[in-house]
Image (cartoon, rainbow, N blue to C red):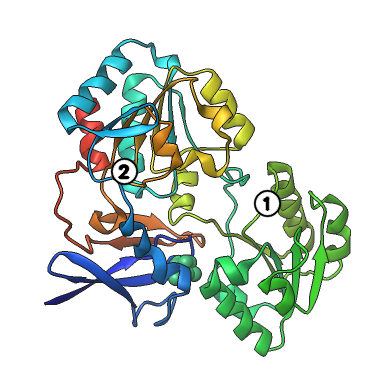
């Protein structure tokens, strides 16, 4: 019998509703969440493909030996981790979280870190720094007379791009800034401005085009200084700013934890003896040499990827369809979701893992 349950799409921070279709305990597809106010009955290919990760995932707690995962059990792996934690002092532990955990999980991990006395807890923010200023809402896109997009919004955040298209149909001028030669977004823009490496020398070219009826949407920054330039551009022109992230709860992570860039993460690794990494593939932004052999790596993730093979132990945790909680989307809306698929396994949730390690 088919079972259809609502959840939030895990493939970017726009926060679209997504339905998970299961049959006899197996996920067989997705279906747009028709009444969800953000995506209004549509999901992009990235969202619909979110379930492809279930084709290849780690199903058992494992110990990694010579790059190979050897299946173990929760009790054994937890004991190994506890022994490692007992052998260090609080300054030698680092916890790398991500925007793939719920707000409730991030709060529990932070509580664990505080109790341990661990100050090195944060997440890789893809060069977006922590920022407190108000962000634009999706409704601001509809009302904008000029939209400046930094990055390829059409490819990476198509349901946000849909709002840009509607705004363009109402007369908005659409400008795209990117460091690539050509993209779906650049091909659809009224004006495309290419930058080399950093935004600095292009800010003046766009400043005169923006005012308080404008919006700046950025899903890519090359460094924290580039984000500061966008913040200044917003302050100088009155244009509203909407940073868009690649993980569903990066805004929630940003509200709670320190956002690190790659150099900061490298320094954290060099200064630590035990690294606990929660739902993050560090090889997305660091090289093998930056990570390997420097600390004992506890990888809490069910993703079967190259990072798992350079970890020391792996606890799969729960997959996103097995979770209930909240994600904060990029416009700051906290959305609640329930478990959307019952998958038969003995894996502990991240909450249980940190409860047992405490
Ligand atoms: S725009 Fe983002 S949140 Fe919406 S369906 Fe696509 S990937 Fe998912």
Percent from the top left, x then y, of residue 107? 34, 40
Is tag 1's residue or tag 2's residue first in the polypeptide sequence? 2
Residue at the disc numbered 1: 221
The quadrant of the picture occupied by the N terminus is bottom left
What residue is at 61 percent from the left and 47 percent from the top?
A: 128
Q: Nearer the viewer, residue 33 or 113?
A: 33
Percent from the top left, x then y, of residue 5? 23, 71
Q: Mark 1 or 2, which is nearer the eye?
A: 1
Percent from the top left, x then y, of residue 134? 58, 57
Q: Label 1, label 2: how many angstroms apart (C-alpha)?
A: 27 Å
Q: Nearer the viewer, residue 183 or 137?
A: 183
Looking at the image, residue 276 lies above or below residue 13:
above
Percent from the top left, x then y, of residue 65? 34, 26
**Ligand 1 within 8 angstroms of badge 1 C-beta:** no
Q: In screen coordinates, is 104 left or right of 94?
A: left
Q: In screen coordinates, is 308 left or right of 356?
A: right
Q: Secondary structure at mark 1?
A: loop
What residue is at 43 percent from the left and 53 percent from the top?
A: 249
Q: In screen coordinates, is 184 left or right of 86?
A: right
Q: In screen coordinates, is 303 left or right of 181?
A: left
Q: Which mark is residue 105?
A: 2
- Crowding at dot 2, Cα within 10 Å, few <14 / some 14-19 / many 20+, comes out as many
- Which quadrant would residue 117 be assigned to in this image? top left
Q: Nearer the viewer, residue 203 or 87?
A: 87
């Amino acid at each position: 019998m088919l079972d259809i349950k609502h959840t939030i799409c895990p493939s970017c921070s726009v926060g679209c509703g997504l339905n998970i279709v299961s049959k006899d305990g197996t996920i067989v597809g997705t279906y747009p969440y028709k009444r969800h106010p953000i995506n209004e009955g549509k999901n992009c290919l990235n969202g619909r493909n979110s379930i492809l990760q279930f084709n290849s995932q780690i199903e058992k707690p494992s110990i990694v030996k010579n790059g190979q995962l050897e299946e173990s059990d929760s009790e054994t792996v937890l004991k190994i981790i506890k022994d490692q934690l007992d052998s260090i002092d609080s300054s030698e532990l680092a916890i790398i979280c991500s925007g793939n955990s719920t707000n409730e999980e991030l709060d529990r991990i932070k509580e664990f870190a505080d109790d341990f006395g661990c100050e090195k807890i944060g997440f890789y923010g893809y060069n977006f720094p922590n920022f407190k200023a108000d962000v634009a809402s999706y409704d601001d896109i509809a009302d904008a007379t000029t939209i400046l997009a930094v990055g390829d919004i059409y490819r990476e955040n198509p349901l946000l791009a849909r709002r840009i298209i509607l705004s363009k149909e109402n007369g908005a001028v659409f400008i795209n800034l990117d460091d690539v030669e050509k993209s779906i977004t650049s091909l659809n823009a009224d004006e495309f401005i290419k930058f080399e490496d950093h935004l600095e020398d292009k800010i003046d070219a766009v400043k005169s085009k923006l005012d308080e009826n404008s919006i700046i949407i950025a899903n890519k920054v090359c460094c924290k200084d580039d984000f500061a330039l966008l913040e200044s551009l917003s302050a100088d022109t009155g244009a509203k700013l909407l940073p868009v992230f690649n993980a569903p709860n990066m805004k929630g992570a940003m509200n709670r934890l320190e956002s690190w860039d790659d150099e900061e993460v490298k320094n954290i690794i060099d200064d630590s003896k035990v690294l606990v990494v929660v739902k993050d593939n560090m090889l997305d932004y660091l090289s093998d040499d930056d990570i390997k052999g420097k600390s004992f790596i506890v990888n809490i993730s069910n993703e079967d990827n190259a990072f798992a093979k350079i970890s020391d132990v792996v606890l799969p945790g729960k997959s996103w369809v097995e979770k209930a909680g909240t994600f904060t989307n990029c416009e700051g809306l906290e959305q609640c979701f329930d478990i959307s698929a019952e998958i038969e396994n003995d894996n502990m949730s991240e909450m249980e893992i940190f409860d047992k390690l405490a």
